[in-house]
Amino acid sequence: MVTGSKELMREMNLKSVIRTIMDDGPISRADISKKLGLTKATISSLVLDLLQQNLVREIGTAEVTSGRKPVLLEFCFNCGYGITVDISGTKITILSATLGGAHCQVKQYPTANVRDQLVPELINAIEKQIALIPECPYGLIGITLGIHGIVDHGSITFTPYCDYGNLDIATPLKERFQVPVYVENEANLSVLGEYTFHYPGKNVVGLSVHSGIGLGIIVKQKLFGGTHGFAGEFGHSIIQVDGRPCPCGNRGCLEQYASEKVLLTELAQLKQVPHLSADEFAVLYQRKDPDAIEIMNRFIKYIAIGINNILNTLDPDLIIINSSFTMNFPQIIPEIKAAITGRNHDICNLLPSELQDMSILLGGICYTRNKFLES
C-alpha cells in the first residue's frame, strides 16, 4: 500500500496520467480512468492541470455508436525541444528535436579530441543548434550528452579512446545555457531510442558495435546501468585468456576482436594502407574481396560468441544490433544467428537497428523528455 501526503499522491498520479496519454494517446478521460483505476473526477482534475500547463491538448471526439462522444487527448510533443550530443573521438554530432523526435535538425562538427578543448567545442555547437529551435511553450528543456565510455550517475569515469575521464562537462554547460544537462553512456541512449520508437518490450538489449562495443540494457521497461555504470561495458568482457591488450587494462576483451575500429585496422594492414573506412570496407566486401570476406567472417564469429554470452547472462526478449557492418549488409544477421549453437540458437531473437546512426541522438531526446516529465 502506497502512503504519503496528498500532494505526493497527486504528483504521482499526474505523472501516470502524462505517461498514459503519451504512450496510448489519443485517449479519452474515461479510458485513462479505466486504465489507471482512478476516479473520473480525479482524472478530470489532473487533465485540467495538464491542459493549463500546455502538456496535453484536446483533439476532437471519438466515434461511438451511441451516447456522448468522448473528447480525445494527446500529448503535446511539440511543447518543447531537446538537444542530444553524441561525443566520439573524431566528431561531435548534435541533434535538436521535439519531445516526440520530430522536426529533427542534425549537424556534425570535427573534434580535436583534446580534453581542454571539448567544452568550448560543445558550447559552440550547442549555441548554433539553439538558434535553429523555433518558439514553443517550454523552449529548450534540456541537453543530453552521449559518451562512448563508462558513466557513473552522470560522471564520466572512463573513455577508452578519449582523454575525458573525470572531466566535468555538465556543469559549465548548465551554467552557460541555464537548462538541465544529462550525461549518459551512448549504448544506453541507443537502446532507449530503439525501445521507444521501434522495439517496445519488457527486457531489451541493444548491442552497439562501433569504435568499441557497448550494451544498452532495458529491464522491466527501465534502463539498467548497474551500481557503478559498468553494466553495459560488454566490450570489456574477456573472451581470450591472456589475449590482446585493451585500453581498459585487461587483456582479451571482446572489442579487441570484434569492434569496427579493430577490424578495419586489421583490413588496412592486410591491404597495406594507412586507413580504411567502413564505406571502403563495404565496397571491398561487395566486390567479394577475399580479405574483406575474412574480416566479415571474424566479425560474425566473435559477435556470435558475444551474443551467446548475452543470452546466457540476461535472457532478453530481443537483441538489437547496431553496426555499420549489419547496416550495410543485413543478410549477415541470419549468419550471426546460425553461428550461435546449442539451445541458445532457438531463443535468439536478433534484430537490426531501425534507427541506425540516429539511435543515440533520438535516445537522448527520449532521455531528456523522461527527465523533464519526472521533474
Image (cartoon, helix red, strand yellow):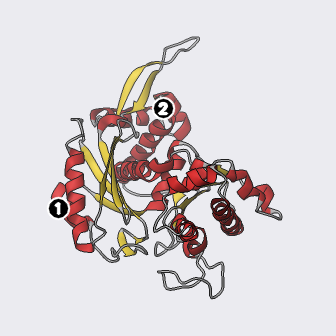
Give the answer, above or below, for where 258 lies relative to 366: below
Residue drawn at x 76%, y 62% is 340
The dot on residue 60 is none
Q: Is residue 26 left or right of residue 220?
A: left
Q: Are marks 2 and 1 in contact (CB under 8 Å)?
A: no
Q: Amino acid at mark 1?
A: Glu
Front residue of 308/56: it is 308
Label 2 crowding class (10 Å Cα cut-off): few <14, some 14-19, many 20+?
Answer: some
> Measured from the top left, where is residue 2 in percent x and y?
49, 57
Front residue of 48/83: it is 83
Q: Earlier in the sequence, mark 2 or mark 1?
A: 2
Q: How many marks?
A: 2
SS at circle 2: loop
Front residue of 319/115: it is 115
Q: Is residue 222 left or right of residue 119?
A: right
Residue drawn at x 48%, y 81% is 248
Q: Which residue is mark 1?
A: 175
Q: Amino acid at mark 2?
A: Gly
Front residue of 155/309: it is 309
Q: Which residue is mark 2?
A: 25
Label 1 crowding class (10 Å Cα cut-off): few <14, some 14-19, many 20+?
Answer: few
